[in-house]
Image (cartoon, rainbow, N blue to C red):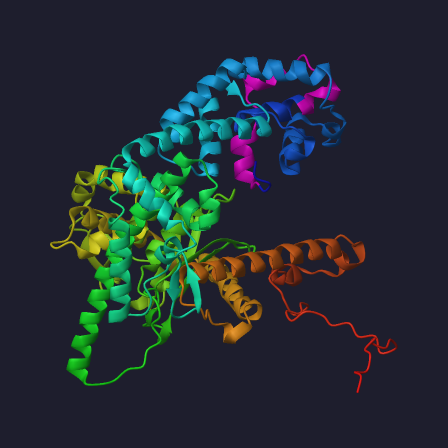
Amino acid sequence: MKRQWDAEELVENFTLLPTEMALLSNKNEENRLGFAVLLKFFQMEAKFPRTKQEVPKQIVSYIARLLSVSPKQYGEYSFNGRTIERHRAEIREFFGFREFNPQDKTELIAWLCEFVLAYDRQASSLEAAVYQRLRQLKLEPPIPEAVERLIRSAVVTTEKQFCAGIFKQIESGTLTKMDALLNTQDALDDDQSQFKQSVFNFLKTDPGRTSLKSIFKEVSKLECIRDLGLPTKLFANVPPKIITHYRRRASAETPRELRRHPAKIRYTLVAAFCWQRNQEITDSLVELLIQIIHRIYVNAERRVDKQLWDQNLMTEWHIRYGGRGVMIYWHVEKKSACIYSQLKTCSSSEVAAMIEGLLRHCTDMKVKKNYVDTHGQNEIAFGFCRLLGFELMPRIKRIGSQKLYLPSAGQKQDFPNLQLVLTKAIDWELIRQQYDQMIKYTTALRLGTAEADTILKRFSRSSPQHPTQKALSELGRAVKTIFLCHYLNSEALRREINEGLTVVENWNSANGFIFYGKNSEIATNRLDEQELSVLCLHLLQISLVYINTLMIQRVLAEATWMKQMRKEDFRALSPLIWLHVNPYGTFRLDMNERLQIDAANA
């Protein structure tokens, strides 16, 4: 359960109804508050709190006010003994729930294997699916450790069945060639690194800079994979997320670690890796060819020699900042905690990165609003955010060039003072016609079966314009018009957006402080190492925020400092500070101690 609740949420979720108040009539004064807290907690979470600290103090205080008792009574309520067991049984009966038993465990594992693990293997998704299923069946969940063991058992069962099915389809000759991939005895020479690497590690490498040599290198990788002779329909009916799961496992392990797996798992991992790398290398070859042809055309047209540091396909020219590099898209919470980071090309859609981060941040935070700059929004983004349940809050530059759309045709004369900024009416009929398609694309984004960047690229490349894209644009125009009216009317809203973006700008300022080596440049040309650098930066920075938060809390816990704080001080308080940190380490010298260094013999 989240720790912070606003007043509206407390009223909506924790107000005691008459039927619930009736349950309290036979409870003595000491137990009423504890019973009420258990009741509302179970109603929200479909499980009981294991400790008193699991329930936020705000909720306890709110329910105590409803019952006209002191919140201290909750601290005196015992979480052990017959009383709480009797209260739990009464609450289960009130909501129609029952306790979890061994038969339920067997059925839940079978359900996980058939309906969930066939499409997703992410731990957080599996845990959420288990709790949702238990709630549907009206079963009280077991302890978290038991849920974890249950999920692990289902994963092992599914993996054995899946790997056995893949293993059956692979011929013996292909298995021998796959073993040769993992052989580190006959390694390949690497011209750049001055060391030898296995064929498997060679297949992991990125395309490299745009050149003819890179094309030949990618062709040799492709020939190596196709020479394995994997069945063409090996993963035909397997969801892409499952293939990606096994491919990532294989990519993260060395050939030695892969050889230690049981045969069926080992060959499945290598097959998934080669299957997906075959597609990626083919795409890389196409991209390399396009870039080489484009370079030939540019050189012939302009007759200008350019020296470009372009050592991988991620590196591109950034139009806005004027230079080559990669783009890191951050999702930073208003309290300076970064919940998601992405490594992107400079030409990739910021709208797609924004949507991806809102859906895939994998934290307990429930995002309601997203603050972006002008270039991080468009009409389709407004449409998708509306369907996904987020409020897109951009900071609008050049507000005078924005247009307001009319609800229906023939209303333009009703707004004589807005003639210069009014434009055509919203096509509601098109939105109705394409509603099912819009929901289909939105569901694909939410479930992760399609990436936002892929969908937006498909829309932008379609000619004539895709009808679903038109409908999303129409919906986005309606939402954006409403937002612009609020934006123009409310100074508080403009301040809120500006404050949210200031946190991000402050976060970017801290990047250079932490990532100070080599002029804050990502010097490597390997995509996996670039992503690792970004993730390390993310981890270090969020650790800095966490430690600063604890230090500030400790200072403010002292009454002397708390009394000195004013309203302006609280407004300026931020955990994203770093002037007190020495990024280079500390060298402690004792000038009174002599180093024990013997003179060299003559």
Chain part drawn in magenta: 5-34
**Residue 81 located left or right of residue 568:** right
User: In this picture, is 440 found above or below 524?
Assistant: above
Q: Residue furthest bottom?
A: 602
Whether residue 152 is situated above or below residue 546 in the rendered picture? above
Q: Position of residue 373 (x, y in %)?
A: 39, 63
Q: Quadrant of residue 223?
A: bottom left
Residue at x 49% of width, y 16% of height: 104
Q: Is residue 21 magenta?
A: yes
Q: Quadrant of residue 160?
A: top left
The residue nearer to you, when weighing 234 against 432, is: 234
Residue 294, by quadrant, is: bottom left
Residue at the (52%, 17%) spot, across then down: 95
Q: Residue at x 47, y 28 (%)?
A: 130
Q: Residue at x 54, y 68 (%)?
A: 515
Instruction: Determine the main secondary structure of the stretch shown in magenta.
Output: helix
User: Who is closer to the viewer here, 30 or 424?
Assistant: 30
User: Which of 368/421 is in front?
Assistant: 368
Q: Compare residues 118 and 16 and report the one nearer the observer.
A: 118
